[in-house]
Amino acid sequence: MRSHLSSLVFLVVFGLASGCSIEFSAQFGAPTRPVGTSKSTSPPSAAPDKPAPAAGKGAEDKAKKGKAIADVVGKDKKFEGLFTLYQNTTNGSTHLVVKKSQLDKEFIYFTHTVDGVPSAGHFRGAFRDNRVFSFRKQFNRIEIISENTAFYFSPTNALKRAASANISPAILASQEILAEDEEKGEMLLKADGLFLSEVFHPVKSLGRGSALGSLSREKTKYLRLRSYPKNTDVVVEYVYENPNAGGPSGPDVTDARFVSIRMQHSLIEMPENDYQPRFDDPRVGYFATQVTDLTSPSATPYRDVIHRWHLVKKDKQAALSEPVEPIVWWIENTTPMELRETIKQATLEWNEAFEAAGFKNAVVVKIQPDDADWDAGDIRYNVLRWTSSPDPPFGGYGPSFVNPRTGQILGADIMLEYVYLANRIRMERLFSEAGLELTPALSGQQLPGAHFCALGHHLHHSALFGQNVLKASGASAQDIGQLLKESIYYLILHEVGHTLGLNHNMRSSQMLSPAQLQDKELTRRQGLTGSVMDYPAANLAPPGAKQGEYFTTKAGPYDRWAIEFGYAPSLSDAAAEQQRMQKLLARSTEPALAFGNDADDMRAPGKAIDPRVMINDLSSDAIGYAQDRIRLAKETMTKLRAKFSDPGQSHHALRTAYLSLTTEIANAAATISRYIGGVQVDRAYTGQPGASRPFTPVSGEEQKRALKVLREQLFAPSAFDAPEDLINHLQMQRRGFDFRSSGEDPKIHERALTIQRAVLDHLLHPDVLARLTNARLYGNRYTTVEFLEDLTQAIFQDDLDGEVRPFRQNLQVEYTSRIARAVGRDGFSGYDSPARSASLAQLRRIESLLKGRNAAGAETKAHTDHVLHLIERALNPD
């Protein structure tokens, strides 16, 4: 969920020893102090550099005829380690040494963004690539091969001899051998073509990075070289030029014609230890490397290996033992002092979960000293970092990098953004565009990277909404501070969970009933949610009720179960181990262990099918809880003027509070809408105790209940009513010429329609309407025709005999236009026949309703004629 950056760590178990390091200021400069070798202790001093022999005349030409490496590198600076590097201190050109013993041997490649700009698809610490590569000699050249790790062949199967058939590795580069040392078994390659290009990784081809210009050969340069016995790191500043770049760019781009991206390439020795891969199971959620067994006759020939750390008990016979090497986290010295203790305690909270796996003190936390002679970019250190960016793509980000062959986690980082704490909306253009920037349920956008986590943005909004509600209700500063502290605690728990290998669990927020949520004794013992890997709504008690915890402050039942699955040491007896695993996984049907991840969640319209796997929800009665949230937001809205009008200040904070409240309404409405056409999923295996049917449609009663709440709270004529003296004070503080493009007046109708459109996007999605029909074959009793009849009534009935307010005019035109498109022409609308037929029936029904209307006012009459015109055009397109 790095959820979330440029600092990583190697486990001490790999035996990293001291090496050589140098950093360059600007292009080149004085070396810094060397980094050390252990992630759990202060770094030792590096070995002194060994001077290279002076170069002779025409050294490189002679080298091609078999001269020594020293004749080529001359007095170049030497970085000795896993791969020895030589760098010319005048022009920066670099050579790489490959040993004959390293040929046809696998290594791990990992790259991450040291610094970038989010508008170009890069941000500090973003993990970009993680693969296996090898060196292969072809005559007088060395090829760098990216190996395919997606398939497995049993070594006992004759098909193993055909393992390379129809599977293509990638030849990333082919470099001429410039010089060779026969005695040492070393070969010298020119490294500039490898690292100063995009050979190893396509810097600008992912996401928004494609907007970058052409790579500048003159400006692209090395920033830092480091080499140790187990890994070699090369930091490069890639400079992209686009002389024709026009139009405005983000505030993080100084000049769009010249954009720099700083990346670190890490070449890592393949670990040699007793680590045993553990295979993935669909009932529990770990990040995994997918591997298909091409020699298996199974219907599911999967050998997907989960990502986890290599933990070994000191005392293998003890039920509870400390690990030989714990998972060590360093809190970077950029972290505000007042947050360090909270971050430390939240990280250490995971130790309770590891006790279920038999480990004591599996996680250790240390503080980076201000005079530390290592930086957060060293992949041998796991670092919790804090930044404050102009346009952060996350609030928290916690990825890890692994050995793709086994799934062993080699290092991880967590990056946290200060904007998460700031009492402001992330994007100030939000309201002027009537958008829903903080309604992630209505957006499926993610940045590149399988581990990207958006919890920080969700949590930022939830905490902001909570603060606004508490402030409006007269809560104390202590209560508001407690909410913020618990939200930070939750963010750390979540992002650390990602670095342990856990992916999201968006179903865990339904563990407790609404009444149980406010029982602090219960939630402090068990947790508010089954897992900290969810995106839950903040727990705010209804008016007059006793307030419980705002956010869960401990790993939940699912988390402890998942850690036991991933980290409990395997039994030596294979049959006993299989029986242990089957017994453990059979518990997946327990309600507190319910699981559903991003592939299952319904945040985007039409995506997935199980409404219980959703973000921004809470409690076992998600519909009722969401209804109460909407009511709470609307009630709070009536108190905003009194609580957010500080003398001597602009009205900007009042506007931000209003945006927060309406965004919460949007999130709650999205949660409710997913129950219509929903199907509950059970991934239990055949014969598993407690299993239900794999697919069970949401009952017709619940679907009708969901639509009834939407009718009353989202579609009703008064759904978006707000005090006039609030609306005429929703003013953004002027800054320069920010209002020139969109105007600064409050656009309440546009915002309301945006929220309603987002819900209609799901309710009228072709997949949802088709599912209503398909699910009738296995239990659904709410037909497409019945649903659209109810939806038409919800949108038209309440003002059929009176004046139609602009809120409803917008909604009715939107709805009519959508079902007209669903009918389509000649059957090409993307909807199935039952949905098209039901839509046609609703067009005719609306036509019948409106033709009998006795419109009193000119505005309502004009609106009525407009809707009838849309229907006429749809029914008679020619």
Image (cartoon, rainbow, N blue to C red):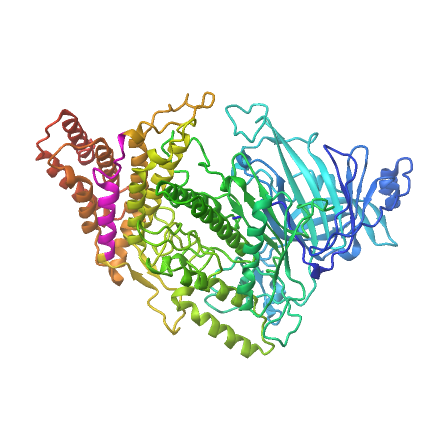
Q: Is residue 329 left or right of residue 710?
A: right
What percent of the width, then of the height, locates residue 235?
69, 41
User: Is 555 drawn above or below residue 379 in the view shown?
Assistant: below
Q: Is residue 389 visible?
A: yes
Say whether residue 707 is magenta: yes
Q: Give the overall secondary structure of the magenta segment.
A: helix
Residue 105 is left or right of residue 126, and the answer is right
What x and y, as percent, mark residue 665? 32, 43
Q: Which residues are magenta?
A: 702-724
Q: Front-most of 482 and 50?
A: 482
Between 434 and 341, the one lying in front of the other is 341
Of 5 and 878, nearer the camera is 5
Residue sitting at x 21%, y 44% = 839
Residue 397 position within the rendered picture, expressed as x and y whole percent measured from the top left = 54, 47
- For the image, the number of numbered tags is 0
Q: Is residue 92 above or below residue 500?
A: above
Q: Position of residue 804 (x, y in %)?
A: 17, 33
